[in-house]
Amino acid sequence: MLTNEQMLVLDAGEDRTAQNGGRTVQLHGYLNMVCDRESCRGLILLLHGWEGSSHAVYNLSMANLLLNAGYDIFRLNLRDHGPGIAVNPYALNRGFFLGTLIDEVAVAAERVSALAGAKDFHIVGLSLGGNFALRLAIRNGEQPIHRLRRVIAVNPAINPLRATRRLDKHPVYRRYFRNSWLNSMYAKQQLFPDLIDAHKLSEHATIYQMTDWIVRTYTSFKSADEYFSSYRIHGHMFRDLTIPTTLITARDDDIIPVVDFYAFAPHPLLDIEIHRYGGHVGFIDAPPLHHALPDLILKAIEPCHSVST
């Protein structure tokens, strides 16, 4: 059970989606602070994956162990994501979630970083959240975030098109994410009936086809390929990297192929860890069962520090 939890709604700046209705973006998240304030090592912002949330099992598990290691934790929910405990995440913004919405995440990250005060601030993103985290690292030279010391991306979706194609090849993954996304869109349609036709979206069988229909119908993108390309992470983007950045991935990840990472040129501030096993945001050692990911994150932040279990 996480301690000292506060739910916060953040002003994340101007809503730049086509369906914004003239409102500013509101994103919400959950702050957990270590009880002994003098021993606090800093603040870590956690960014979940697509159709995940602040309360996803992997997020709660990591937050608990990192909190015990002395770090304050802020689990941010991306637009239209969240547990729906104290606020309806679909009601916060009229426009629906897109992977291109980096500006609002950057504003929210800056808001969260202010909570660190004089302590160090770190960003950890997983899967699609890892894609967002890397884009924040790349932007940091021109748009620095207060006290940001390191960015860590775990199984980041650096090539969204390839990741989506692979996801569609796995019936279990495809069914889960398709149903979850449809439920999100039906919830959005119930609140904003004129915003989207979730019934027509349900006529498409794959995540790729759904994405293609969504972006052709409601955005300026001409195809899913163009949309996915707009937030793909290319190796040359790290050329002007100004913040230490760690990528953690696994050779047996079914969704994010390890070959995507081989094209990245060496950079003194870029560290790429490719583990033999770990799956997609798994990293469970057995036996005995042990969630190794918090250890990997702490070692990236503080090489001599590890989690006690």
Image (cartoon, rainbow, N blue to C red):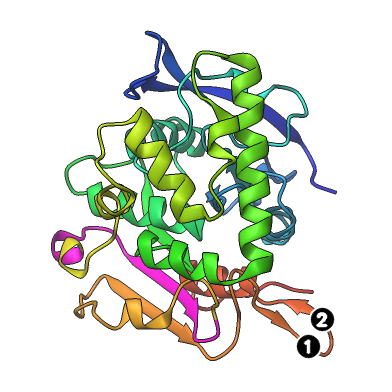
What amino acid does circle 2 point to?
A: Leu
Which of the labelled discs sits on residue 286, or is there none?
Answer: 1
* The magenta segment: 238-252
Are the residues at dot 2 and dot 1 in contact (C-beta closer than 8 Å)?
Answer: yes
In the image, 153 versus 179, the foreground residue is 179
Q: Position of residue 171 (x, y in %)?
A: 65, 68
In the image, 270 versus 4, the foreground residue is 270
In the image, 278 versus 146, the foreground residue is 278
Count all numbered tags in the image, as a single digit.
2
Q: Residue at x 46, y 72 (%)?
A: 256
Q: Residue at x 85, y 49 (%)?
A: 1
* 259 displayed left or right of 254: left
- Residue designated by label 2: 289
Does residue 295 lie above or below 76 as drawn? Answer: below
Q: CA distance from mark 2 to mark 1?
A: 5 Å
Task: Tell me if mark 1 has few (under 14), some (14-19) or many (20+) residues whose alpha carbon lies within 10 angstroms of its own.
Answer: few
Element carrying mark 1: loop
Judge whether residue 148 is colored magenta.
Answer: no
Does residue 178 lie above or below 267 as drawn? Answer: above
What amino acid does circle 1 point to?
A: Ala
Which of the labelled discs sits on residue 127, or is there none?
Answer: none
